[in-house]
Image: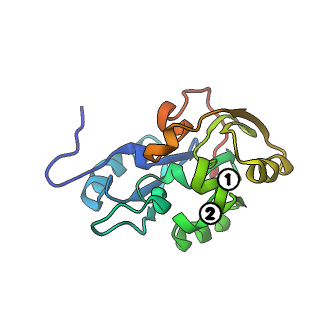
Amino acid sequence: LYTVHGKGVCEVGAFTRMADDLIVAMLSTDCNQDGLDQVRPLLERAGYRVWVARSAGPLHVFHPELIGWIHSDMWIAPLDRDLALIYPPWCDYETIRYLKHIGYELIEADREEQEHVAPANMITIEPRKVVMPAGAPKTRAAVEDAGVDVIEVEYDEVIKYGGSIRCTTMQLVRDPGPGVFG
């Protein structure tokens, strides 16, 4: 049994599993460097490469227009092993550059839709099949244009506290799927 200890903070909800061999971890109020340093070797031993995204973050005041500063699943969602939905304003550019470097095609979520219903906070059921909150027609069209089957669900209450579908369900356990690196 491993636990994060000392001054470490590491809520794994701050991470997004992109494929069977890639996790995007995010440094934020919910995961500091000390916590990540304790958890990262366990993820790597389990076969994951860990990319570390950095949050813009708050100082003293919560900014509702920046709800993506805590968890990466608020601004990125895997659609397939080389395809993701992303909301770039809540993501550091090095993460965008890295994802493109390893072969990801990135679809951008619509700003107004992301701020109101957080379509990037979705559940991937299988490669190119997702459950997305309703109320994001522009983002849905962009995702469907990339060949992804979208199942919409009315889910507008959870956004009031800064989350959406994935925040409620977390990652689904599924059969092994595609990896990015092998």
Which three-letter amino acid code belongs to the residue tagged 2? Leu
Q: For this rendering, which residue is in front, 147 or 47?
A: 147
**Label 2 belongs to which residue?**
99
Residue shown at the point (31%, 64%) measured from the top left: 61
Residue 51 seen in this snapshot: no
In the rendered image, the quadrant that contains the N terminus is top left
* Protein image colouring: rainbow
User: x%, y% of residue 66?
Assistant: 47, 62
User: x%, y% of residue 55?
Assistant: 42, 65
Q: What number is the disc on residue 84? A: 1
Which three-letter amino acid code belongs to the residue tagged 1? Ala
User: x%, y% of residue 103?
Assistant: 70, 61
Tell me which numbered mark, 2 or 1, is placed earlier along the sequence.
Answer: 1
Residue 170 seen in this snapshot: yes
Residue contact at pointers 2 and 1, CB within 8 angstroms: yes
Residue shown at the point (63%, 58%) measured from the top left: 86
Q: Quadrant of residue 149?
A: top right
- Mark 1 Cα within 10 Å, few/some/many (few <14, many 20+)? many
Q: Secondary structure at mark 2?
A: helix
